[in-house]
Image: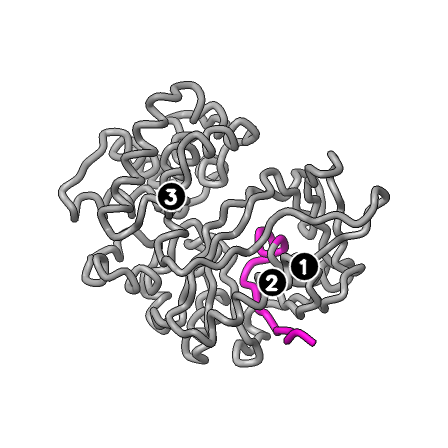
Amino acid sequence: MAEKYNVLILGASYGSLLATKLLLAGHSVKLACLPSEAEIINAEGTVVRLPVRSIGETVEIASKNLPGNLAADSPDKINPGEFDIVALAMQEPQYRTAGARELLDAVGKAKVPCMSIMNMPPLPYLRRVESLSGAALEQCYADSKVWDACEPELMTLASPDPQAFRPPGEQPNILQVGLPTNFKVAAFHNDAHTTILRNIEADIMAIRYETPKGNVELPVKLKVHDSIFVPFAKWPMLIAGNYRCIGDDEMRPIKEAVHSDLEASREIYQWVCALCETIGADRGDMVPFEKYANAALGLLKPSSAARGLFGGAPFIERVDKLVQSIAARHGRQSDIVDEIVRRVDARSSLNRSS
């Protein structure tokens, strides 16, 4: 019998997608979230709506019908030492808030291996990259001190390629997946911790789900890679699409940001790919622009970064600033990246002052 794991996930929104895959495979999951979210999740479970291309339909997966066990709790009631692995599924600025900050610190001190599915790589993960080990990148984070207790050897990163959102006007335990792609996760420094990932990878790969049209293979897998640079494949996507949704006075869908000027999108995409190669990535670690541009045709909403800023968020994940800072360290500069950083800085400052 395959080993079953006890997994803690920080964040019940995007985290419920990963949780559903784990529950389908029979693992136990606890979601760390707001008390109001925990109350409804413990009473009703979660629901993830997942488009399945093979049957041309969206499948609604309710956690209460799955073999794994799901619970939710507020951060102050959770002991991270009870878990085999932790997944970080909140946006980076949220870890500075009361409750989340203390739980992340406890996770680090308990020395539990962590897999981040944030767009913004945790600072300890960047310390695993030899070319960045001495880089001063703290200014790119909402509060870099929250990562002090987390050791680089216990941190890995998954590229959060699947796109998902909470449908407006519905309960907070419901998640709609828009783009059902894979989580591409780098191996841990420690082989024993990587074994956990590979076992979960195999478990998720083996899942078949019963629908009225028969047993189907569900999208959104966990793919484990030896290269620590594979998760950075998300950076060109974020710069070419997500952050270019942000205008001075309005936002636009990712599809429009990419396809309104496809050549400009290609240029900046390839510029970020080249930067990733400069810090150690192989070309094979990156996703070809054509594949990304095709996927962007289905991204009909503004990015979470844009929605956050125009919804009044004082801080968002600053992969734009991280890319700009790493580029400057290597003598590179992009007018497009500089303009993105300017716009995000301006809107964030406005939100903080209002």
Q: Is 168 placed left or right of 133 in the picture?
A: right
The amino acid at mark 2 is Ala
Count of numbered tags: 3
Q: Earlier in the sequence, mark 1 or mark 3?
A: 1
The location of residue 76, given as percent across then percent down, is 55, 73
Q: Nearer the viewer, residue 311 or 274?
A: 274
> Which residue is labeled 1 in the image?
206
Marks 1 and 2 close (CB-CB < 8 Å):
yes
Q: Residue at x 39, y 45 (%)?
A: 233
> Which residue is labeled 2 in the image?
202
The location of residue 335, given as percent across then percent down, is 23, 29
Give above or below for 321 relative to 336: below
Q: Which residues are magenta?
A: 1-17
Q: Secondary structure at mark 2?
A: helix
Asked which quadrant contains residue 147, the reply is bottom left
Q: CA distance from mark 1 to mark 3?
A: 26 Å
What mark, if any, has residue 286 been given in the picture? 3
The location of residue 243, given as percent across then percent down, is 39, 35
Q: Residue at x 36, y 39 (%)?
A: 236
The location of residue 89, given as percent across then percent down, is 52, 57
Q: CA distance from mark 2 to mark 3?
A: 23 Å
Q: Earlier in the sequence, mark 2 or mark 3?
A: 2
Marks 1 and 3 close (CB-CB < 8 Å):
no
Give above or below for 335 relative to 282: above
Q: Quadrant of the C terminus?
A: top left
The amino acid at mark 3 is Met
Give above or below for 122 relative to 151: above
The amino acid at mark 1 is Ala
Marks 2 and 3 close (CB-CB < 8 Å):
no
Q: CA distance from mark 1 to mark 2?
A: 6 Å
